[in-house]
Image (spheres, rainbow, N blue to C red):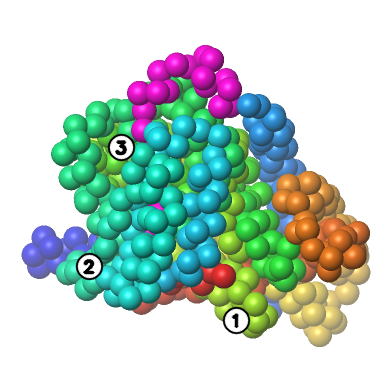
Amino acid sequence: MTKKQRDYYLYRGLEIIPGFLVWATFIFAITVSIINPLLGIYVIIAFDVYWILRIAYLSIFLLISWFKYRKTIKTDWWNFLQHNQLKWQEYYHLIFLPTAGEPFEVVDRTFSNLAKSKYDHKKMIIILGGEEGLKDHFEPIRRKIEEKYSSVFYKILVTLHPKDLPGELRGKGANLYHMGRQIKKYVDQNDFDYKKLIVSAFDVDTITHPEYFAYLTHKFLSHKNPYQTSFQPMAFYHNNVWGSDPFTKVVANSTTFWLLTDLARPDRLFTFSSHSMSWQALVDVGFWQNNIVTEDSRIFLQCFIKYDGNYQTEPMHIPVSMNSPYIGPFWKSMVNQYKQMRRWAWGVEHFPYMVWRFSKKKKIPLKKKIIYIWNQTEGVYSWATAPIIILIMGQLPLYVAELKGTTNALTQNAPLVLQTLMTSGMFGLLIIAIMSIVILPPMPDKKEYKKFKLARYTLVLLQWVVFPLTMIIFGSIPAVDAQTRLMLGKYMGFNVTKKN
């Protein structure tokens, strides 16, 4: 066997591990529930207690991030920057906006928002990236955008990603990779200082907070090592929130609050979706990886490995907002939502990458390796298994015990105990439900919204009753789907989330 063949089988073995653990857990849960239902009841009670404690633990971090967020958005960062960090004038922002067939209205709204940012627009270089395969759709949009905004910013640059390049996986990562390489030519030709360029990679529907670039510049200039740091904002999905159905709203808000807990724990924070970083670091690692699905978080690992573990993600408690997968018709929106969650769950591809790469990088501290591998493994494992285990083992061992006539104090009291534990867990959900109302953008100034204003806000609160259902349909199942595909070697392509 050649070294290349041996490496292939070793790497495939690593890809199998996450899915194997998930299915082994399900088989264990069902087997125990049938063979020894009393043991199954003990296991699910212990498991529920663990999750209640975990929810309480995560609620602390959620509240920490929440208060930091409330404080951050009340500060006039543009004014602060102008009076306290005068070197900001030496820096330019490179803003990458890859497209994949979105309508003009979506692209225009993003440019309009950037034009309203409380920042010097002549320090902003916008890169609009099209796909050659969608050139007929992209070209009219590109022309309209340039005509409308070319005088607003320092420069609007346009790239066109060639189709069917060898070795690439068609998607956002490949487009960003091409955009980065093209912009490097522009940067070099115009003698920009690499260390004076700050990169932001956004989805094309990303709406930034008015103070985003001022706050980012402050964080960059005040950081002790900004050239080996990514900057991660909060992710809201509010662009179309008032027209969305309860399911997409709950799933979107769940993502927001999950990220909030991670923002309070920088030691485990990866980049996610929209993020910012130094141009110097981006060039050092050769830009975003062009043959994977989850390039947004992989870019952090590329830098972490490149700099021997001396790289981090700095939390930014300021929001950017994007579209939820809601596109109108209910079932189409549900399919769109499921595919988005499955694509995010495909982040499990980082596990074999980390183990493989970390094993070859002796300079990365062992403690850091263990922390990141554990956080990644435990995160994708819990995502896939926890809701389904709670559902299966909350019912199956009790049903089997009843069939077998196994009656004792435990079987009689278990339903009440489990119900009490689940009710206790609702406290954390109540906190999130209240916060989800506070962070909502203003309601559209339309008659149909004003007429039922109170009812709509009440619905936002009540919609969280579907959370247990969304945890399974749009949480566990797509995560199991993704990990099973990786285990079987059925690799996913990049599914573009449709946006209206």
Mark 1, Cα crowd under 10 Å, few <14 / some 14-19 / many 20+, is some
- Residue sitting at the far left: 2
Q: CA distance from mark 2 to mark 3?
A: 23 Å
| Type of amino acid at the residue the image marks with label 1 | Lys
Question: Is residue 370 visible to us here?
Answer: no
Residue that appears at 55% across and 48% down: 113
294 relative position to 72: left or right: left
Q: Earlier in the sequence, mark 1 or mark 3?
A: 3
Q: Which of the 4 image quadrants contains residue 404?
A: bottom right
Tag 3 or tag 2, which sits nearer the N-term? 2
Residue appearing at x 38%, y 49% in the figure = 150
Residue to which mark 2 is pinned:
162
CB atoms of marks 2 and 3 within 8 Å = no
For label 3, count other residues whose C-alpha is less than 10 Å away and answer few (under 14), some (14-19) or many (20+).
many
Q: Secondary structure at mark 1?
A: helix
Residue 179, quarter of the rendered image: bottom left
Asked if residue 213 is positioned above or below residue 46 in the image, the reply reads above
Taking the image as shown, residue 452 lies to the left or right of residue 217, namely right
Horizontal and vertical percent position of residue 144: 41, 62
**Residue 71 point in image, percent of width and height:** 69, 29
Residue 47 painted magenta: no
Mark in the foreground, 1 or 2: 2
Residue designated by label 1? 332
The tag earlier along the polypeptide, 1 or 2, is 2
Q: Give the residue displayed 54% in from the left and 39% down from the top.
A: 117
Magenta region, residue range: 77-100
Q: Position of residue 182 (x, y in %)?
A: 22, 51
For the N terminus, the quadrant is bottom left
